[in-house]
Amino acid sequence: MFAFLGLQDINQLIDQTVPSSIRNNRDLEVGSSLSETEALAKLKAMASKNKLYQNHIGMGYHGTLTPHVILRNILENPGCYTQYTPYQAEIAQGRLESLLNYQTMVADITGLPVANASLLDEATAAAEAMSMCFNIARRKKKSFFVSELVHPQTIDLVKTRAERFGVEVIVGDHKTYDAANKDLCGTLIQYPATDGSIDDYEPFIAASKSVGAKVVMATDLLALTTLKSPGEMGADFAVRNSQRFGVPMGYGGPHAASILRI
């Protein structure tokens, strides 16, 4: 190509095609190389200088760091999804094993023996749990209490779902609410709460169950590695967000959730 154009090298080609007015004739000031962790920290420091005029919900979603040893040996390990040539039938075997391992893990953490694989997000799981409470009550009890310390997006979605069933959603303080409501099909509490507080819910759970209401507890799986489990406190259902286990934010979700029950 150079011979055809009558040029000697790439530099001559650039000189004749790129205007000198837009070229930088000095060496680029490129710093030393950084590891992925160092690069992310530097980019976050640069981004933190931006002025934030609007904050999104973010409740229930937290930035995480997945150790590379887990990324490489679990998430990128072909043995976790198949031991064979990856055509569909064999991939399905590995997927089923991964789901079983996942369900076993969250069942152990929450103290509840039955777990599904996943739903959409935590708010959707809470709405599904509300409808389960309503159906367990044979659709005869049409009140559902939600603690004001539940994430606001969860409260809104539960209200939307309950409206279709004709269920009245009562939002209030679980510490002062009189659970002796004979029309109560279930209650929803957040553990830890949306403001990060950790309450002893056992008296409220006992009072709710005394009138036949089912108790749904929205939980943080990572927090449950050190806190008393919903099963130990007497909750009937637990809903949670799996993002806390090292899943990247993905621009805020949604992330997979699930329901566990006694």
Image (spheres, rainbow, N blue to C red):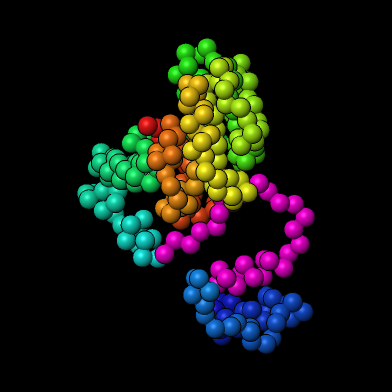
Q: Quick check: 7 above or below 258?
A: below
Q: Is residue 41 magenta?
A: yes
- Quarter of the image containing the C terminus? top left
Is 145 or 18 nearer to us in this picture? 145
User: Residue farthest to the bottom?
Assistant: 26
Q: Residue at x 44, y 34 (%)?
A: 235
Label the magenta part by its dominant secondary structure: loop
Report which quarter residue 156 is drawn in: top right
* Residue 116 placement (x, y as % from top left): 38, 35
- Tell me if residue 22 is in the magenta stretch: no
- Residue 97 visible in the current orientation: yes
Residue 261: x and y in percent read 40, 32
Does 59 sit left or right of 50 as displayed? left
- Tally of marks: 0
In depth, the one of 41 and 30 nearer the eye is 41
Q: 208 or 34, which lies in front?
A: 208
Regarding residue 59, the answer to whether it shows in the image is no
The quarter holding residue 45 reads bottom right
The image shows residue 45, relative to residue 30, as above or below, that is above
Q: Name above or below for residue 164 compared with residue 224.
A: above
State the image coordinates of residue 252 (x, y, percent, origin top left): 59, 49
Tell me: residue 190, above or below residue 133.
below
In percent of the image, x 66 and y 46: which residue is there? 57
Drawn side of residue 237 relative to residue 62, left or right: left
At 58% across and 45% down in the image, what residue appears? 193
Q: In the current view of this chain or complex, which residue is farthest to the left?
A: 84
The span shown in magenta is: 39-67
Q: Position of residue 43 (x, y in %)?
A: 61, 69
Give the residue drawn at x 41%, y 53%: 225
The picture quadrant where one finds residue 63 is bottom right
From the viewer's perspective, tell me whether residue 175 is left or right of residue 139.
right
